Amino acid sequence: MARTPLPAGGTPTLPETMTPALQLFLIVSAALFCIGLLAALSRRHAIFILIGIEMMLAAAGINFIAFWRFGPQPAPPTGVMVTIFAIAIAAAEAAVGLALVMAVYRHYRTTNVDQFDQLKG
Amino acid sequence: MRGFLDQIFVNAKQQILSLFAGTPDWVGQIVSSLLSISALLAVFLSLFALMSLFERKILARIQNRLGPNRVGPFGLLQPAADGIKMLIKEDIVPLRADKVMHFLAPILIAATAILALGIIPYGRNMTPFAIDGGILFFFAVGSTTEVAVFMAGWGSNNKFSMLGAMRAIAQMVSYELPLIITVLPVVMVVGSLRPDAIVAAQGGYSLGVLPHWFVFTPWGAAAFILFFISGLVESNRTPFDVPEGESEIVAGHMTEYSGFKYATFFLAEYFGMFAVSGLAVTLFLGGWHAPIRVLEIVPSYLWFFLKLGVLLFVFIWIRGTLPRTRVDQVMNFAWKFMLPMAFTCVVAAAIWHYQGRRFAGYLWSLGLLLLVYFALSRFLETGKKFAPRVYRFAE
Amino acid sequence: MSSAAFFLIAIVTLAAALAAATLPKLIHAALSFALAFVGVAAFYFLLGAEFVGLVQVFVYVGAVAVLIVFTILLTRRDVDRERGFNWSGVLIALAVFAGLLWAILKTARVSVLAVPVAPLTVRQIGEALMTDYVWPLQCIGVLLTAALIGALVLVMEEKR
């Protein structure tokens, strides 16, 4: 399953016994999701929260690709497409989120989310 | 005979690999990778040594001096002497530096520069890392350099380092856009991100003389020039070496590095230069194809390195000729001129393609490029922009 | 080989992600975040989606990590101030992980092995993007443009 560069036309295959099962990928992505959740919930810095959200999105991406890869083959690359779009959306989210952090910082001189408690700037 | 010389390195590698025929699959893969890596490193490290000498020699010629000529015949052993000097220098780490980041930055920057070299086809069947999205790999790895530069700047805990790193990242991010967008027309016309496919698409000759290199089409010529300028910026070379301008901020993000770590930065800069030039050769100058059909007797890799050498000479030539630009000039140039021109190249390539890649399309795309070029120079009024500049600081 | 690669990548990715979530210094966290995303990209490579892996490195390490680092620099006065750590978040995260783990281990259908398959080429992805997924693609284009303009408007200095 590990893709190694081969000349065009060759389809690299490995014995099935050597490839990790879908379960392992799901467990890793669940762990990544929970670490993201941890960062988003327990840190008070706005940038950490953003990092946490990005990690949760990446965990979802791993799941999409894994389900595509382990599903019946040949399958249309739906999982891959969703992941590509998710990456694009995450990039947009990061740009706007960081711009918000900076705009808020200008007003409050802080990036601690607990202190963003006024609606009036 | 011709085929033998052309494929001598490929065959040698196959010979060595056949010694490992009985072992499991992964042993062969690892040996194959190690062989490619050591060949790559051997070639480019010696090219680096030669280049550092020739750069000084050529710069000296441009400035009417002799250049290094004391060590060995014609100063040929100068790189060895420099290397020994760098190795035995004391390695100074600032007391307040972020030790881990200060240490990791040169490693990361050199590693990314070497990785980027992997996807370039150096000759017929001579691509070390033939991956389907090779061009994308190049840029993905190249964009990691920004993080390394930042680590160097931040880890040094020095205001010159930090300023230099900020400048470097700002201009690298800005010029990454034109760099990538000028690659798009080539990718569009070839219909592949594989460097091998791009080189293969440039084979063949019109009338037996004019090779089908993309640099000989109007959009290709424009894209090549834009790509080359962006490459100059990406490798922080004069006239765009604002991040490390000695007269302003000492040496930018390299200020706090000494001895071998400094040499590693130096090496990374040169490797970046080789990588960008190599990609330019692959994309626009026909890769390893010979310029005339008769000359195809000469092995393909020699053609590649000849073209690479010419581009590297232009790098040095520009360094010896042009003064350093100002920061705001660099940024303005990127966003107001390079980016629109790069997009025009994409459109011009599309027109060329849909006119059947014939003479009419040639003229149409040339006309479009000239129109946008003159409109831009008219609109930007480049001649009148000498007012005092306005400083805007981040708060 | 593949299993060894999998466990190596998994350990590096999760360690880097954990470092990104818990390190006290923001800059270190941001760089660990970049490393974690290189690890995620390596997973995509392992799963035969090279293109997505390259896009992941390109977008996250090249763009998002640099953006985060720049934001940290521009809000620097506030960066190293000591602030509390919300321990209830750890509990919630652990509870969610336990729930997910239970669900994954309980489901028999996910313990399948991959069938060998021809790798997904960039050409296939491009064709899919230009045929079946052309509307999502256009929407993403509009979204990115809007995000770009929005981010610029947000950080632009206000005229006083």
Image (tube, helix red, strand yellow):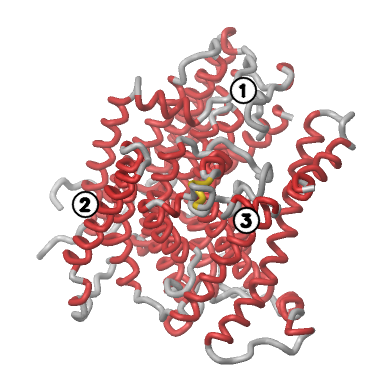
Q: Is residue B45 left or right of residue B242?
A: right
The quarter of the rendered structure image containing the N terminus of chain C is top right
Q: Residue at x 58, y 86 (%)?
A: B60
Q: Amino acid at mark 1?
A: Leu
Q: Amino acid at mark 3?
A: Phe
Q: Considering the numbered disc 2 on the image, is that residue within a helix, a strand or a loop?
A: helix
> In the rendered image of this protein, does residue B146 appear above or below residue B208?
below
**The numbered mark 2 sits on a residue in which chain?**
C
**The numbered mark 1 sits on a residue in which chain?**
A
How many numbered discs?
3
- 10 Å neighbourhood of mark 3: few (<14), some, or many (≥20)? many
Mark 1, mark 3: which one is toward the viewer?
Answer: 3
Please state the horizontal and vertical placement of residue B13, each as a whole percent of the image: 80, 43
Q: Amino acid at mark 2?
A: Leu
| Residue B110 found in image quarter | bottom right
Q: Is residue B160 left or right of residue B126?
A: left
Residue carrying label 2: C154
Q: Residue furthest top?
A: C108
Foreground residue among B258 and B39: B39
Foreground residue among C146 and C82: C146
Q: Which mark is residue B304?
A: 3
Residue carrying label 1: A24
Alpha carbons under labels 1 and 2: distance apart: 42 Å
